Image (cartoon, grey):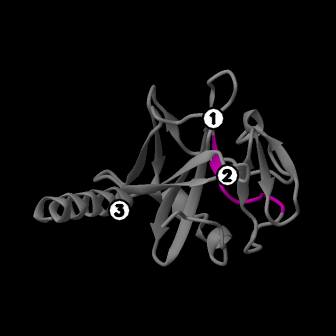
Amino acid sequence: MKRSCKLITALALAMLLLSACGGSGTGGSGDTVTYITAEADGDGNLVIDTSGTTEYATYINYKADDVTIQLLLVRDGDGELHYAFNTCQVCSPSPKAYFVQDGSVFICQNCGNSFDAEEVGEAQGGCNPANIADLTEREDALVIPVQYLEQYSGSFAGWQGPTGL
């Protein structure tokens, strides 16, 4: 009996530690997506490891004061990395101006517009995720100045997208 209690306690502790770093959920069709909470490094940048990014969305949460700014990362069918703010360029600042993955498409929860993963971060204007203009793309990481990210906190002030937390 003592051994099973120790095992259950160890498993519960491991789950708690893992949930502090990130979480998983499902897209509209049951696909696994990942939520990660990120913090700035000592140089004032958000450094995002992209080595684990797949065809299922990774949502990066960054806290700017009391506002959660969320980024969307995904790889298309050719393995190319795509990234954007997870808010709609047209529908923002609506609380439902965010995108949820359903299979290989992303759907705006405010207006219902949908598009393929290869379009994430590609289009300027229109109903698509807002582009991230100020960043450095490395082999397995994106580096984004926090000062740049925080300029977009107004777009997320009333935002009610899922954070996985």
Q: Nearer the viewer, residue 8 or 162?
A: 8
- Could you tell me which secondary element the residue under label 3 belongs to? helix
Examine the image and state in which quarter residue 83 appears: top right
Q: Is residue 102 magenta?
A: no
Residue type at tag 1: Glu
Residue nearer the viewer, 46 or 164: 164
Q: Position of residue 11 (x, y in %)?
A: 27, 57
Circle on res. 55: 1
| Residue in view at x 80 percent, y 45 percent | 124
Q: Amino acid at mark 3?
A: Ala
The percent position of residue 95, horizontal first and vertical second, equals: 73, 74
Q: Is label 2 in contact with label 1 (beta carbons under 8 Å)?
A: no
The numbered dot on residue 20 is: 3
Q: Residue at x 75, y 38 (%)?
A: 104
Residue 122, by quadrant, is top right
Q: Residue at x 79, y 63 (%)?
A: 109
The amino acid type of the residue labelled 2 equals: Gly
